[in-house]
Image (tube, rainbow, N blue to C red):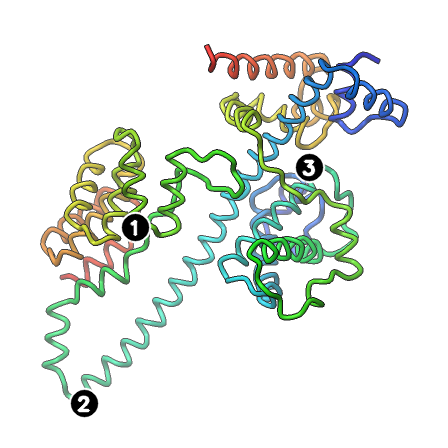
Amino acid sequence: MKYSAIKVKERKLHITLEDLKTGSDTVLKQVYNDNRAKFLNFARRYSLSEEENIDVYQDAYIIFYENIMNGKVEGFTSSISTYLFGIGKHLIFDRIKKNKRLLHSEFELTMIGEEDQIINSLEIEEEALTSEQELLKHYFETLGKKCQDLLTYFYYRGYTIQEIMIAENYNSENVVKAAKSRCMKTLRERIQAKDD
Amino acid sequence: MDKQGLLYKYFSNQLSDKDRLHFEELLLTDSEFRAAFDYEKGLKLAIKKSQSEKLKSKLASFEKEIQSKKITRHRKSKVYSWSIAASIAILIGVSWFGYNTFSNPNYNELFDTNYEPYPNTVHLITRGEAHLSEEKKAFIAYESGHYKEAVSLFSTLDQNLNYLDLYMGISYLNIDDTEKAIELFRKAETKDHEFKEAANWYLALAYLKNNDEQRAKTVLEKQILKYEFKKIEASELLMLLQ
């Protein structure tokens, strides 16, 4: 862990899955900057504006990153840019459908081979939150950092109690379990308190 | 296995095939279990959303950095071509014209070069939200450049919100109500919060737009002495006004 943190201080040529998983902002930025021009160039083939293309790039990047964090991507079978293009193409297609814009040619958006497979293995759709879930989000964000981290490890990254214990330096699994129950209790109480 | 254990296994991706059958059956038959599951599933989605919003704002800051580098490059090349143009002008001997332009800066042009709307740092706007608060609606109008609408939406909000004077001022500036904008920036600048630095900078620009060189200079001097926001731009602008 420490070693990779030192390594990423300098500009790296090959970013690994582990580098991305550390959640380091330096890596996040480097990957963003390295793939941006390539992606925008590719996206210009379609009928969206430059601003929309940047927006799509960011959304594709977020989806890619989420799938790394939740363990859906277990190893790079393709280059990072292939993942981004695959997701990006899907998002562009979605937007064009929504905007009801005409495509220059239907063929251009047919996905082929590698990119197609990528899409199938990832979690892409983002559901809008219901009002209860908006509340959960709001009160989750009012929790202390320790609670937010713990619940994020569990629900967002799918860590087991044991993995959380190691990642966050807890003394035992029971301590993690107790902490998790406390955080959940606080969350429930805060939501209930709003109605009182 | 108890129900709590099943939920735990589900969310940490450890359900065996046998567990899964049991799990799915409970979802259909046990309403209490179903409610507990929905709650945790909702929390999972809420955390995901919270993470993706954080990520989006990080990416937006990377993007801003890229864009601002581009602008600096653009400005440099502008200065370069301007210096060529200036030498030619001197060469062909229209020094009188040159003298005149330098001694009377074009305030509108200076305003246009330096003005860009302050980014929305208050509300992250994401697509597909079911319920929009008035506050969010105001920022959507602001971000999409519908300043008239933004003014009327901002006016409905609690006037003590610390960011309000700044964003409302900028909206007024865009619909050419400079006096109102000046009033709001001055008000924002007297308060103690994170937006006062920006408010002072926009106050200088508003004076410039009003051709009030003297006040613009005073405010710019203050910007350079007291604040970090747009410090370099402020000193460049001040030099042009001297």
Name the residue beneath numbered marker 1.
B230
What's under tag 2, amino acid-wise? Answer: Ile
For the C terminus of chain B, give its image quadrant: bottom left
* Circle 3 chain: A
**Is B84 or B179 nearer to us in this picture?**
B179
Q: Position of residue B2 (x, y in %)?
A: 80, 12
* Circle 1 chain: B
Name the residue beneath numbered marker 2.
B92
Residue lying farthest to the top in this orientation: A196
- The vertical placement of A146 against B69, above or below, is above
* Circle 2 chain: B
CB under 8 Å between callouts 3 and 2?
no
To the question of a shared chain for discs 2 and 1, the answer is yes
Which numbered marker is on residue B75? none
Q: Position of residue B8 (x, y in %)?
A: 75, 20
Residue lying farthest to the front in this orientation: A100
What's under tag 3, amino acid-wise? Answer: Met
Left or right: A148 with respect to B106?
right
- The vertical placement of B229 against B17, above or below, is below
At 50% across and 62% down in the image, what residue appears? A50
**Is B147 or B163 nearer to us in this picture?**
B147
Residue lying farthest to the right in this orientation: B18
Which numbered marker is on residue A1? 3
